[in-house]
Image (cartoon, rainbow, N blue to C red):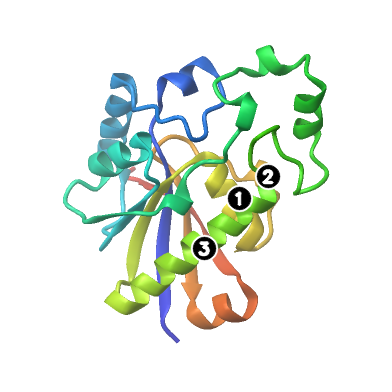
């Protein structure tokens, strides 16, 4: 039974990350510091050798892919974009904490809860499923054994919480810039159970 290895990475830092504001569909590029941090991690960590990179269309992800995997072909997957935060987009928690709809969204309790004019966790889960399904089919068609995905922290945690084994809550699946998780898929397990195995975190320290 053929297994397919995917390394999921969070993009590098942007000005919005430094300022602590919500960004989903807003297309922030990496900062100079964010680029330097990723370059430093290439020296500090052992990144996997991959045959293709699948990236969110947003600049912070495509720029990360070009730094971490400069010689690897890149495929843009629109379904890997970050959650749409609706009217919370571009605002900080401090700016929003007085809003009842923000407090309701933070409290959660249902995957259908969404920011006003935004996207729910349930919708993100469906979109993430489509992304991984497309990637798996492409890997099978091209006989790729190991590929990388460059996406967003929310996409990674949601994807692992929805489909990963063993089961973890999304709040325990945090990724730092340029880091993430390894997963292993088989076509049989994915088709039968819509599940994959979480192998651990990536990249590996050189020490």
Q: Of helix, strand and loop, which one carries label 3? A: helix
Q: Is residue 180 above or below residue 192?
A: above
Q: Is residue 159 above or below residue 196?
A: above
Q: Is residue 52 above or below residue 155?
A: below
User: Image point 49% across, 71% down: which residue?
Assistant: 185
Q: Of helix, strand and loop, which one carries label 2? A: loop
Q: Is residue 46 left or right of residue 181?
A: left
Quarter-wise, where is residue 49 in the image?
A: bottom left
Q: Earlier in the sequence, mark 2 or mark 3?
A: 2
**Circle 2 Cα neighbour tier, 10 Å, few/some/many (<14 / 14–19 / ≥20):** some
Residue assigned mark 1: 124
Residue assigned mark 2: 120
Contact flag, marks 1 and 2 (Cβ < 8 Å):
yes
Q: Earlier in the sequence, mark 3 or mark 1?
A: 1
User: Image point 66% across, 19% down: which residue?
Assistant: 93
Q: Of helix, strand and loop, which one carries label 1? A: helix
Judged from this view, the residue extending furthest toward the front is 117
The Cα atoms of the two marked residues, 1 and 2, are separated by: 6 Å
Assign the C terminus to one quadrant of the image: top left
Judged from this view, the residue extending furthest toward the bottom is 1
- Residue 130's disc number: 3
The Cα atoms of the two marked residues, 2 and 3, are separated by: 16 Å
Q: Position of residue 26 (x, y in %)?
A: 46, 30
Residue 33 seen: yes
């Amino acid at each position: 039974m053929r297994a397919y290895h995917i390394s999921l990475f969070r993009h590098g830092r942007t000005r919005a990350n430094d300022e602590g504001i919500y960004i989903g569909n807003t297309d922030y590029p990496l900062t100079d510091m964010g680029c330097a941090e990723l370059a430093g991690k290439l020296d500090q960590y052992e990144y996997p050798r991959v045959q293709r990179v699948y990236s969110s269309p947003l600049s912070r992800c495509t720029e990360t892919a070009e730094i971490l995997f400069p010689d690897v072909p890149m495929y843009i997957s629109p379904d890997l974009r970050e959650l749409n935060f609706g009217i919370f987009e571009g605002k900080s928690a401090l700016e929003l904490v007085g809003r009842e709809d923000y407090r309701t969204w933070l409290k959660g309790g249902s995957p259908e809860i969404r920011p006003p004019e935004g996207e729910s966790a349930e919708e993100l889960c469906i979109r993430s499923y489509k992304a991984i399904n497309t990637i798996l089919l492409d890997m099978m068609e091209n006989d790729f054994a190991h590929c990388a995905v460059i996406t967003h922290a929310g996409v990674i945690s949601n994807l692992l919480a929805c489909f990963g084994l063993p089961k973890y809550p999304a709040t325990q699946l945090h990724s730092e810039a340029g880091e993430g998780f390894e997963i292993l898929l088989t076509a049989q397990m994915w088709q039968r159970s819509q599940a994959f195995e979480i192998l651990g975190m990536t990249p590996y320290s050189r020490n």
